[in-house]
Image (cartoon, helix red, strand yellow):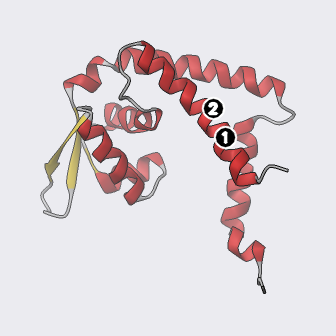
Amino acid sequence: MIALGTLMRHVHELMDGAIADVYAEHGLPDYRPRYSPVVHTLVARGPLPIRDLAAAIGVTHSAASQTVVQMRRGGFVTLEKGADARHRIVHLTERARAALPLIEAERAATERAVRELDAELPVPLEQLLSEALKALERRDFRARIGPVTP
């Protein structure tokens, strides 16, 4: 039997890999699907401190910071010091703005593909994952594991 974590990672890799292939096919091999929530948020809200960006996309500050560093290396964002020296403000670059038509087209195509996948499943994937997340927020997984004695 395949472990649950392995199964979840494999599903994610298959979906994310296919999306990355779309970008590579269109001349952006260094654009990662994980960049899109950052791009969409910055387009909608303008430049943001990493802390606010993390909250807006629903990830930890550390995860947002790591993604922003990768995006900066790829030329998709720049960072400026905020009013407080501890804050860095994330801005989209012209390279990211030029990619917006592709990013939006990929988003629409991905949403169609997810609906198609959901039609083949007994429960829509997003619904299942959302319910699992809510259950884990009510009682975290460590509490569910309980005591472990070797």
- At horizontal 47% and vertical 15% (from top left) the residue drawn is 105
Q: Quadrant of residue 135?
A: bottom right
CB atoms of marks 1 and 2 within 8 Å: yes
State the count of labels: 2
- At horizontal 27% and vertical 32% (from top left) the residue drawn is 76
Residue 103: give x, y in percent of width and height. Answer: 42, 21
Q: Does residue 80 lie above or below 94 as drawn?
A: below
Q: Nearer the viewer, residue 74 or 101?
A: 74
Q: Does residue 76 lie above or below 50 as drawn?
A: above
**Horizontal relation, residue 124 to residue 86: left or right:** right
Secondary element under disc 1, as helix, strand or loop, is helix
Secondary element under disc 2, as helix, strand or loop, is helix
Q: Quadrant of residue 150?
A: bottom right
Residue 34: give x, y in percent of width and height. Answer: 45, 38
Spatial CA distance of label 1 from label 2 is 6 Å
Residue 40: give x, y in percent of width and height. Answer: 40, 32
| Residue at the spot of label 1 | 10
What amino acid is found at the position of numbered circle 1 in the picture?
A: His
Specify few, some or many for label 2: CA neighbours under 10 Å numbering under 14, 14-19, or 20 or more: few
| Residue at the spot of label 2 | 14
**Horizontal relation, residue 113 to residue 64: left or right:** right
Residue 13: give x, y in percent of width and height. Answer: 60, 37
**Horizontal relation, residue 78 to residue 2: left or right:** left
- At horizontal 69% and vertical 39% (from top left) the residue drawn is 126
Q: Nearer the viewer, residue 81 or 65?
A: 65
Q: Quadrant of residue 28?
A: top left
**Horizontal relation, residue 120 to residue 53: left or right:** right
What amino acid is found at the position of numbered circle 2 in the picture?
A: Leu
